[in-house]
Image: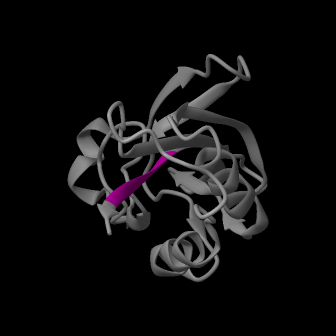
Amino acid sequence: MKQSVFLISMLILTAALLGWSGNYAALKYNSCKTEIDSITKKLIYTVADTEPMNEGGKSRLLRELERNIVTSNFEIDTTNHDPNVIVAFIVDNDGSIKGERIINDKTQKVGKQMLDIIMSLKWTPAKCNGKLVPMLIKQKLVIDIMEN
């Protein structure tokens, strides 16, 4: 039976699960939360006044993921399929990507492709109290399998 794999992109939230609105004004009372990153062992922000943004914005990132993720070169186990592929990365205070990681990827191929695309884009770092800060971002991609 032939399978067609369709990608449905969804931007996941930041590590604080606040969405990609870039507007944390409503959270000023709780502004700028930090923690030590388990991968890099450095202080990172999980909540900031403005979050990191790639050049071209959220829509460009989603377009790049949809256009460039290749799924035709591998098979997906439909009986144990988890449609969620989740990666995380830190946009450092200089806009570079650090501490990239694959959180969930049953395909063992899509997460790496996602990180390659994310790392190819230019990023503007997060800001907290007017200062550029490193921030953890999570990105989710849902793989929807449709049988032909």
Most extreme residue toward the front, as rendered? Answer: 1
Specify whether 25 is left or right of 89: left
Image height check: is 8 above or below 119?
below
Q: Please provide percent x and percent y for residue 96.
A: 78, 53
Q: Please provide percent x and percent y for residue 33.
A: 43, 31
Quadrant of the rendered image containing residue 84: top left
Specify whether 23 is left or right of 26: right
Q: Nearer the viewer, residue 78 or 90?
A: 78
Most extreme residue toward the left, as rendered? Answer: 26
Which residue is depicted at the point 64% across and 78% down? 55
Image height check: is 29 above or below 49?
above
Which residue is depicted at the point 64% across and 73% down? 68
Q: Quadrant of the C terminus?
A: bottom left
Q: How many numbered circles does the render carry?
A: 0
Quadrant of the rendered image containing residue 17: top left
Q: Please provide percent x and percent y for residue 47.
A: 41, 41
Image height check: is 4 above or below 135?
below
The answer to whether residue 76 is magenta is no
Which residue is depicted at the point 74% across and 56% down? 116
Q: Please provide percent x and percent y for residue 27.
A: 25, 47
The answer to whether residue 141 is magenta is yes
Specify whether 141 is left or right of 64: left
Q: Which residues are magenta?
A: 138-145
Which residue is depicted at the point 73% across and 23% down? 40
Q: Quadrant of the N terminus?
A: bottom left
| Main SS, magenta residues | strand
Give the colour scheme shown.
Answer: one colour
Q: Nearer the viewer, residue 134 or 39?
A: 39
